[in-house]
Amino acid sequence: MPSLRPDQLKELYRLMAFTRRVDQEAVALQRQGELTAFPPLTGQEAAQVGSAYALQRQDFAFPSYREMGVAIVRGVDLVEYLRAYRGDWNGGLYDLYAHNFGPIASSVGSHALHAVGWAMGAALDGGGKAAIVYFGEGATSEGDVHEAMNFAGIFRAPVVFFVQNNQWAISVPVARQTAAPIHRKAEAYGFPGLRIDGNDVLAVHAATAEALERARAGGGPTLIEALTYRLGAHSTADDPTRYRQAAEVEPWRAQDPLLRLAAQIDDEDFTRQVVEEVEERVRDLRTRLLSAPRAEPEEMFEFVYAEPPATLAAQREELRQWHS
């Protein structure tokens, strides 16, 4: 058992409950045309919240496109976060350095290199900081991830590679992604790898805290494979019933991370109170998101060339006329 106080266990539950409810709301907002797309994370709350809760202020988190739970723990304004999924700004509109939370990375695996680069720089600055980078098991099929782990191993970079193995890379099962367990890949790069129960928030927190502490102290990188399950679709553009059976999903529902933590807290009055708190916060979030200003389409031309060529200027004028 990790050394977490009862009030910290309740804080973890609040964070996970809020993460799940916002996840549900974001899917609803997409169906209502308020978001262009959204990648649900229901079922993965313990992996995200438990690991992010182990971070210290000076550490830096590098998310992929499904880490809203990590954003919540880091204090990111969810309106600014969700505006990325509305198409207002690539990567999100929040201040990266106010939260030490990187931009949303939709290019699978590419941000692993960014995390290692930041970690190497942090080590050169004098240590005491660590990076954590989040990706799914499907990203381990990308060359960028292996390049990042190789660099991290050689330079002993203070970074934690946190793999949320949710069993499916869109419609491809993990058995078709890798012939060997993911955590064993760390051996080839010369640093520790471990597999944990990604639906047990206490196990996630304990393993991540230990890996981060070792990284900050100069002990090098760690690869953590958190076994979890994506209960919903890969994204709002996906239909999981076309490639997996309901019989596969049901056993994972019994491992629901919120139910498991609630059973340990064993306080029904508290859990009911959390439901009320979360609903109020989600209503406020919806109101603020719907009233947030829309991005101007012409903005896409602003950051391409210092001196736009005639072809780009013509395209901008065509858009201006069409949009007006």
Image: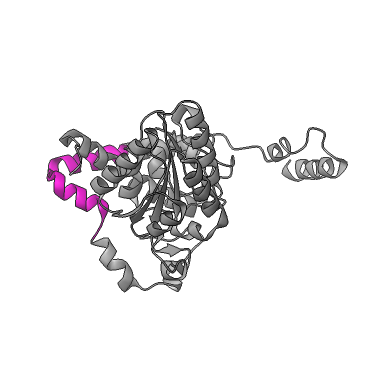
Provide the residue span drawn in magenta.
Answer: 255-280
Q: Position of residue 42 (x, y in %)?
A: 35, 54
Residue for point 82% across, 37% down = 308
Residue for point 44% across, 55% down = 136
Is residue 194 depicted above or below 125 in this figure?
below
Q: Is any part of residue 17 visible from this angle?
A: no
Q: Is any part of residue 257 visible from this angle?
A: yes
Q: Does 316 sit left or right of 71 as displayed?
A: right
Q: Position of residue 1 (x, y in %)?
A: 17, 44
Snapshot quadrant of residue 306: top right
- Magenta span: helix, strand or loop, mainly? helix
Q: Does 91 sit left or right of 227 as displayed?
A: right
Residue for point 29% across, 45% down = 207
Is residue 297 depicted above or below 171 in this figure?
above
Snapshot quadrant of residue 267: top left
Membership of 259 in magenta stretch: yes
Is residue 185 depicted above or below 301 in this figure?
below
